[in-house]
Amino acid sequence: MTAIRKIGFIGVGNMGNPMAANLLKGGFDVTVFDARAETAAAFVTQHGGKAASSLADLARGVDAVVTMLPDDKIVRKVMLDEGGAAASMAKGTVLIDMGTCDPTGTRTTAESLEKIGLHMVDAPVMGGVVFAKDASLDIMAGGSKEQVERVTPLLKAMGQSIVHCGDVGSAHAMKALANYINACALINAIEAMTIGKKFGLDAKMMADALVPMCAGRNHPIQKKIIPQILNRKYATGMALSFIAKDVRIAVNTAHAIGAAVPLGEKVSALWDDAVTKVGATVDQTEVVRYWEDATGVKL
């Protein structure tokens, strides 16, 4: 299997620019293309490498094509539409899609590429522009073991960690789920702190206090999911109904002082329903059964 040295990079915007630059710093031969020709030209002026005049020009003779684009539809378009990169790629070349895309769309694109002798790895990133600049991105990878191993040296030039999530599409699914968790956590904290502020608590005090109370060893993934749920111990020592009660107290407090609590109201309703369906006296971590039963899977 040919080692990857020559790369075509499509999309050198805010994220793609520093990522492609780090590939150049890593000793790779990089040709860039962007929908805005001036953006690709500016990249070459700033970092070096070459700018392609077309997708076909970019794809000729490369070992891999990297895309950093907004969604899977655009990835499919630049690869498979008339004039797309795939038609000029040699058999055995790999597409590495590093944007955040719909995993079902990624699988569809991968299937189309495999039919013409091309491979695909989805490798979305976590960390944003700051980590892209210093090559410390966290990168998830989806694809065959062989192809993920093949692209790992390239990924290491852009990131500090690479996690193989499974088959093609699995990394895009994992990225979306991670950001879903982060999005929930962000508005959860904001909602709680605005309630606290209206109650009279200091914002900085709350933020400082919530770090040891809710992050690190007290974060539910570290404290409950890994040690209690995944091994089915269910032994935190707190009953499910007690957590439901505490959530209800927080929501009632918000109502009493006229604070907005839309997320809390929904969370309280879910925990109350779990008390009814799973049981009031079982361990709080058995709340997982509420979602397992509804979804038809076991964690």
Image: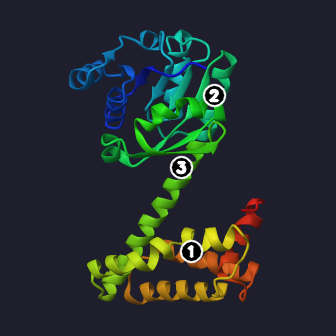
Asked if the residues shown at circle 3 and circle 2 are in contact, with their CB atoms under 8 angstroms apart, the answer is: no
Q: Residue furthest left?
A: 45
- Of the numbered discs in the image, which one, if any, rests on residue 110? 2
Scheme of colours in the image: rainbow
Residue sitting nearer the eye, 191 or 41 = 41
Instruction: For label 1, count other residues whose C-alpha is less than 10 Å away and answer few (under 14), some (14-19) or many (20+).
Output: some
- Which amino acid lies under the numbered mark 3 shown in the image of this protein? Ala
Q: In which quarter of the image is the N terminus?
A: top right
Q: Name the residue under label 1.
A: 223
Residue 169, percent across and down? 62, 39
Name the side, left or right, on which 64 lies relative to 145: left
Name the mark on residue 176.
3
Is there any visible trace of residue 73 in the rendered image? no
Q: Residue at horizontal 30%, vertical 47%?
A: 130
- Which residue is rendered at x = 73% and y = 72% of the image? 232
Picture quadrant where residue 237 is located? bottom right
Structural distance between the alpha carbons of marks 3 and 2: 18 Å
Report if the CB atoms under discs 2 and 1 are less than 8 Å apart: no
Q: Distance between the residues labelled 3 and 1?
A: 23 Å
Judge left or right: residue 107 versus residue 83: right
Residue count near mark 2 (Cα–Cα under 10 Å), binned few <14, some 14–19, many ≥20? many
Q: Disc 2 to disc 1, how far (Cα)?
A: 37 Å
| Along the line of sight, the residue nearer the viewer: 175 or 3 | 3
**Which label is found at residue 60?**
none
How many marks can you see?
A: 3
What residue type is disc 1 on?
Answer: Lys
Q: Does 103 appear above or below 189? A: above
Q: What residue type is labelled 2?
A: Ala
